[in-house]
Amino acid sequence: MTLAVFQELLMALGGYALFFYILYKFAEFSQ
């Protein structure tokens, strides 16, 4: 696996993590 593919995968995972973190914070805030 090349470094470029690994970076793409890491960016995608980071994006999903950030999305779910914001979603979690929003749900916590709305309670």
Image: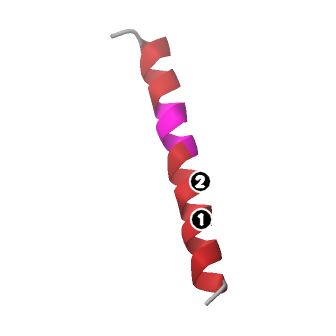
Taking the spot 52% from the left edge, 23% from the top edge, the residue there is 8
Taking the spot 65% from the left edge, 74% from the top edge, the residue there is 26
Q: Which residue is mark 2?
A: 19
Q: Position of residue 30 (x, y in %)?
A: 66, 85
| Mark 2 vs 1: CB contact within 8 A | yes
Q: Secondary structure at mark 2?
A: helix
Residue type highlighted by circle 2? Phe
Q: Position of residue 16 (x, y in %)?
A: 53, 46
Q: Residue furthest top?
A: 2
Q: Position of residue 29 (x, y in %)?
A: 65, 84
Q: Position of residue 27 (x, y in %)?
A: 59, 77
For marks 2 and 1, give the CA distance.
Answer: 6 Å
Taking the spot 42% from the left edge, 21% from the top edge, the residue there is 6
Magenta region includes residue 11: yes
User: In front: 25, or 7?
Assistant: 25
Q: Which residues are magenta?
A: 10-15
Q: Does residue 7 lie above or below 15 as drawn?
A: above
Q: Residue furthest left?
A: 1
Number of marks: 2
Residue type highlighted by circle 1? Leu
Taking the spot 57% from the left edge, 82% from the top edge, the residue there is 28
Q: Which mark is residue 23?
A: 1
Q: Does residue 20 lie above or below 24 as drawn?
A: above
Badge 2: residue crowd in 10 Å (few <14, some 14–19, many ≥20): few
Badge 1: residue crowd in 10 Å (few <14, some 14–19, many ≥20): few
Q: Quadrant of the C terminus?
A: bottom right
Q: Does residue 29 lie above or below 6 as drawn?
A: below
Q: Magenta stretch mostly in which secondary structure?
A: helix
Q: Which mark is residue 12?
A: none
Q: Secondary structure at mark 1?
A: helix
Magenta region includes residue 26: no
Residue 2 left/right relative to 29 = left
